[in-house]
Image (tube, rainbow, N blue to C red):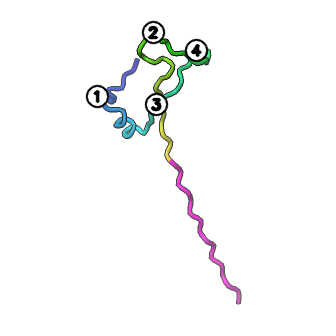
Amino acid sequence: MKRNYWNLGMSEWLKNILFGTKTIVVRARDKVGRYVKDDKSTPENEAFTKKTVKIKPKKKAKKKTKKKTTKKK
């Protein structure tokens, strides 16, 4: 198992800014793809997990240029 030692000791928002990622909370799924329900006997909620997603840079809109017309004499 590879370990990323850059992440040790960094807060969540700092990792998101440095690595260009965003942490979202999604429903947990099992191997078949069905949702996992929460086990009420444990204090931790197993129904939701955190997932890190890379942020795609926004595309810049191209500026439209007007064509120059020449006058005929």
Circle nearer the viewer, 1 or 2:
2
Name the residue located 46 percent from the left edge and 26 percent from the top edge. 50
User: Residue beneath label 3, please?
Assistant: 52
Distance from label 2 to label 4 (Cα)? 23 Å
Q: Which mark is residue 53?
A: none
- Crowding at dot 2, Cα within 10 Å, few <14 / some 14-19 / many 20+, comes out as few
Q: At numbered mark 4, what does the secondary structure look like: helix, strand or loop?
A: loop
List x then y, in percent, for residue 52.
46, 30
Q: At numbered mark 2, what does the secondary structure look like: helix, strand or loop?
A: loop
Amino acid type, mark 2: Ser
Is 71 positioned to the left or the right of 29 in the image? right
Name the residue located 46 percent from the left edge and 18 percent from the top edge. 45
Q: Which mark is residue 9?
A: 1
Q: Report the magenta residues as a range.
A: 58-73
Amino acid type, mark 1: Gly
Distance from label 2 to label 3 (Cα)? 28 Å
Viewer-proximal residue among 19 and 24: 24
User: Residue beneath label 4, please?
Assistant: 31
